[in-house]
Image (cartoon, rainbow, N blue to C red):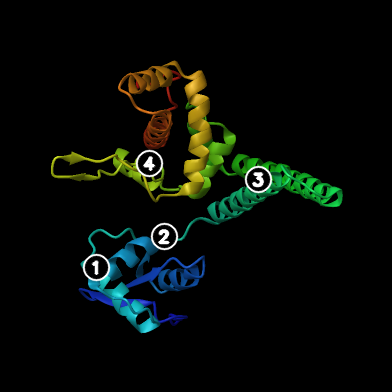
Amino acid sequence: MGLLCPTPELVGLRHGRNPFVICEASGGYERHVLNCAVEVGLSAHRAHGTRTRNFAKFLGLSAKTDAVDARMLALFAAKSVDLRLWQPPAPETVELRGLRRRRDDLAQMIRIEQNRLEHPQIKHVERSLKRHVRAMSNEIKELDTQIAALVAATPEFRQKSGLLTSVIGVGLKTAAACLAYLPELGSLTKGEAASIVGLAPHAQDSGTLKGRRRISGGRREVRSSLYMAALTALRLDPAMQAFAHRLKERGKPAKVVITAIMRKLAVILNAVLKTGEPARRTHSA
């Protein structure tokens, strides 16, 4: 079949004799382009919008049109090294991600509605808010049941979930979030595992000035799940407690300590999937 090009942002580049396809992530619309590329045997990459925008700034491009974006993406692909090739996810992963994303969307809406409940001025509005929260809470329970059933019915998910939940602090919901949003977990290096969820500290140094390290970017859906897991690990895992105590003794604030625990959990989760061995109940911190 012919490759359909819905937008000019689909760019074929010559790497030797093989065309290479690159497009930006665009809220899911890019999947049509990527699927078409894979179907006709073309290598493809889904570029992160922040990276391409920064690249455009580097080129001094202030105008934004389809033609300008296409040329920018082509140059971005030509100048980049070791771009991760896009692989279509398995149908089970697509289903799990869809269920989990809907669950997370509902949880966010519940938080918004609960914030509105703090200062209700009209009784009818208060009753409406409470009905909405109850309805969405019931939807989340149903989605949790469907997610658990899908994980149990899929051998790969079931095996990986067992490994992930062997880590202190990680429950079934956090494991499902990792399976849905981070299918690469288990094939990453330590640095990649921390960076891909936005937990790698970035230096802010200049000359003799040592700036505060900051985290940024990454997959926030996994990061929010790791936050809850880190709180649990800090309460239950003696090794994590000792690790946190050492950081506090060095003057690290509480926010930095919990971020460090989240980063350590990401590395441990990657390791247990890579080795295929359950985590020891007391980790070396």
Q: Nearer the viewer, mark 3 or mark 4?
A: 3
For the point 34% across and 27% down, the residue is 252
Between discs 4 and 2, the one toward the N terminus: 2
Q: Nearer the viewer, mark 4 or mark 2?
A: 4
Left/right of residue 71 with respect to residue 241 in the rendered view: left
Nearer to us of marks 3 and 2 is 3
**Residue at image location 46% in from the left, 61% down from the top:** 88
Residue at (37, 61) in percent of width and height: 50
Which residue, given by chain and number where applicable, does mark 4 sit on?
199
- Relative height, residue 17 to residue 257 (above, below): below
Q: CA distance from mark 4 to mark 2?
A: 24 Å
Point 41% across, 72% down: residue: 37
Query: If you read the primary sequence from the N terminus, does the residue marked by circle 3 or circle 1 appear first?
Result: 1
Q: Amino acid at mark 3?
A: Arg
Q: CA distance from mark 3 to mark 4?
A: 24 Å
SS for tag 4?
A: loop
| Residue designated by label 1 | 58
Residue type highlighted by circle 2: Gln
Q: Earlier in the sequence, mark 2 or mark 1?
A: 1
State yes or no: discs 3 and 4 in contact (Cβ < 8 Å): no
Residue toward you, 61 or 69: 61
Residue at numbered disc 3? 111
* Callout 2 crowding tier (Cα within 10 Å): few <14, some 14–19, many ≥20: few
Q: For mark 4, does the 10 Å Cα neighbourhood hold few (<14), some (14 to 19), or many (20 or more) residues?
A: many
Label 2 sits on residue: 87
Q: Is residue 12 visible?
A: yes
- Residue 65 position, x and y percent, is 39, 82
Question: Residue 279: which quarter of the image?
Answer: top left
Marked residue nearer the N-terminal end (1 or 4): 1
